[in-house]
């Protein structure tokens, strides 16, 4: 008997057609995040927020969209045929393929077309709904699409139909008679025609209308008007896609419910200048306050060129009375090295610990170390004064710092009679070429309201990338503390404000204090 060998089967992965939500990364579903983390490839549209793509750390990212707002990306959107071809080819190479679309893929998103194409090709697929812009965008503008006092009916309709139809199939005039809320997607270019049809259908010219551009994002803009004047107002404001129009009495709730635009930093574009590993915390804090954040990774944190000095000090820690940590980076680096060497927090038993501020203290606590000393003000001058008060004359102090740390702390402690050993536990390097290029584009083409500096090294990196006397236009500089402020002055710039508390919450409070404003409709 002859046994035939089975032919090797080609891998057929599953394509997940996933909704990314209307813009705000916080509206991404749990299921969508899980799939992004598992994906081998992500084929995404331009409406997908870049922070959502960060979840796909293991995936190859393929951008098939065109962002009309971007100055950094100049390419046309891919055709549907090319997108289909990508889905087919990657289904033969990867187990999990995510087709990531803005909003909900089955609400004006061509998700059904792509699913039908996959079905015809025998490619397994699943649909993962997303939060639709139809109700989320109005909600961020303070507009409920339904309310029992105003509207028990909401209609989602496209304002931009397939040109192949030849003529519109949306019954605008009949919609005008429904006495409900009409939410129009993608209709800005046809707004005048839509308004004309609704008027012809009998919708009162006094009907409230709101047009919302880039809803749920910190750059959200809302134009308020009536059916009689909304087209003129939208044109005057220069509203562009993506934008959504809401027709109906529910717009009257906006004056009381416009919560998003009342956030203290809404409408402000803030450029932060930190190391990549540190930027995320500050970015999150700013975004919670409503700011749009641009991240310039001005410094890179690297291990020391040699661990010889630290390893020697670690073996002889019992000979020191104090160990001083001057940054969270130092704590991370020290305990990473200790773990590799087979040690943990117990190595500091009998040694008093000083930390420059609450961020460093909290990081040390995470490693099982409780500092004996944290000064009330979080900078080197305050730390040196606090240590000197502890009668450090003749005491051995181990300073665990960066390679470019200012000499101030070492000199002050030595002058007070301490035997100070300074050990480099991490290095600070400048940004890569891509970061420098992005910064130059932003400074030239973006309207940046605030630039934050959290250390002297971020100041030096910033001006190194731009030159010592760049044009900062109307941007206000905010410093985290006196040492950083002094470095800014050395470059000829005076900060608009220095944080009273020299930590991230203090920095946020400083930004809020210079951004007090009132929200006015466009």
Image (tube, rainbow, N blue to C red):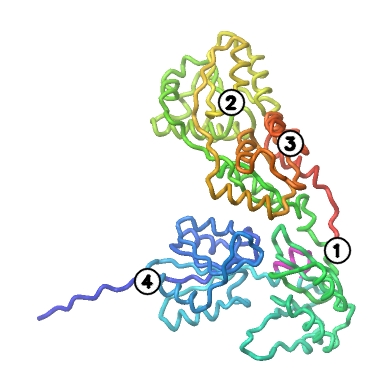
Q: Mark 1: few, some, or many residues within 10 Å (few <14, many ≥20)?
A: few
Relative to 521, is 477 above or below? above
Q: CA distance from mark 4 to mark 3?
A: 57 Å
The first of marks 1 and 4 along the sequence is 4
* Foreground pick, 66 / 148: 66
| Position in image of residue 46 (x %, y %) | 59, 66
The first of marks 3 and 2 along the sequence is 2
Q: CA distance from mark 1 to mark 2?
A: 50 Å
Marks 1,4: beta carbons within 8 A: no
Q: Nearer the viewer, mark 4 or mark 3?
A: 3
Q: Nearer the viewer, mark 4 or mark 2?
A: 4
Task: Give the numbered dot on residue 255.
Answer: 1
Relative to 483, is 291 above or below? below
Q: Secondary structure at mark 3?
A: loop
* Foreground pick, 186 / 440: 440
Q: Nearer the viewer, mark 1 or mark 2?
A: 1
The first of marks 1 and 2 along the sequence is 1
Which residue position holds label 2? Answer: 371
Q: Which residues are magenta?
A: 136-144
Residue visible at 72% across and 32% down? 489
Task: Give the numbered dot on residue 161.
Answer: none
Marks 4,2: beta carbons within 8 A: no
> From the viewer's perspective, is 339 left or right of 213?
left
* Foreground pick, 435 / 81: 435
Which residue position holds label 3? Answer: 493
């Amino acid at each position: 008997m002859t046994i035939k060998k089975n032919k090797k089967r080609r891998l057929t992965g599953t394509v997940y057609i996933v909704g990314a939500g209307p813009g705000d990364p916080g509206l991404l579903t749990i299921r969508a995040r899980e799939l992004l983390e598992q994906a081998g490839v992500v084929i995404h549209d331009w409406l997908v927020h870049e922070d959502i793509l960060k979840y796909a750390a293991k995936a190859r990212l393929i951008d098939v969209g065109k962002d009309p707002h971007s100055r950094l990306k100049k390419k046309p959107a891919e055709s549907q045929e090319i997108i289909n071809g990508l889905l087919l080819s990657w289904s033969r190479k990867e187990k999990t393929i995510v087709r990531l679309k803005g909003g909900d893929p089955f609400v004006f998103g061509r998700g059904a077309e792509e699913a039908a194409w996959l079905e015809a090709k025998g490619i397994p697929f699943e649909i993962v709904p997303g939060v639709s812009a139809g109700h989320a965008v109005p909600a961020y503008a303070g507009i409920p699409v339904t309310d029992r006092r105003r509207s028990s009916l909401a209609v989602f309709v496209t304002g931009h139909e397939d040109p192949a139809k030849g003529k519109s199939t949306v019954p605008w005039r009949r919609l005008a008679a429904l006495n409900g809320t009409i939410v129009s997607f993608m209709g800005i270019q046809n707004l005048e025609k839509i308004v004309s049809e609704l008027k012809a259908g009998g919708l009162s010219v006094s009907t409230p209308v709101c047009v919302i551009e880039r809803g749920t994002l910190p750059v959200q803009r809302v134009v308020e008007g009536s059916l009689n004047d909304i087209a003129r107002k939208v044109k005057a404001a220069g509203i562009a896609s993506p934008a959504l129009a809401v027709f109906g009495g529910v717009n009257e709730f906006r004056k009381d419910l416009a919560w998003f635009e009342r956030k203290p930093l809404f409408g402000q574009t803030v450029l932060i200048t930190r190391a990549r590993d540190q930027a995320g915390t500050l970015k999150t804090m700013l975004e919670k306050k409503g700011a749009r954040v641009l991240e310039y990774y001005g410094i890179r944190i690297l291990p020391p060129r040699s661990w010889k000095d630290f390893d020697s000090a670690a073996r002889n820690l019992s000979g020191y009375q104090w160990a001083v940590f001057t940054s969270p980076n130092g704590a991370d680096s020290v305990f990473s090295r200790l773990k590799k060497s087979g040690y943990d927090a117990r190595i500091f038993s009998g040694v008093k610990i000083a930390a420059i501020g609450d961020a460093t203290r909290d990081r040390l606590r995470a490693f099982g170390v409780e500092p004996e000393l944290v000064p009330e003000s979080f900078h080197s001058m305050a730390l040196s004064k606090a240590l000197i008060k502890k009668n450090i004359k003749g005491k051995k102090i181990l300073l665990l710092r960066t390679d470019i740390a200012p000499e101030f702390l070492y000199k002050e402690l030595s002058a007070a009679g301490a035997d100070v050993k300074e050990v480099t536990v991490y290095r600070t390097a400048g940004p890569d070429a891509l970061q420098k290029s992005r910064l130059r584009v932003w400074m030239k083409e973006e309207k940046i309201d605030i630039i934050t500096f959290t250390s002297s090294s971020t100041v030096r990196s910033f001006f190194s990338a731009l030159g010592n006397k760049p044009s900062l236009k109307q941007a206000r500089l905010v410093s985290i503390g006196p040492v950083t402020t002094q470095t800014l002055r050395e470059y000829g710039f005076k900060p608009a404000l220095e944080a009273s508390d020299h930590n991230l919450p203090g920095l946020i409070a400083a930004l809020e204090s210079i951004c007090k404003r009132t929200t006015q409709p466009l």
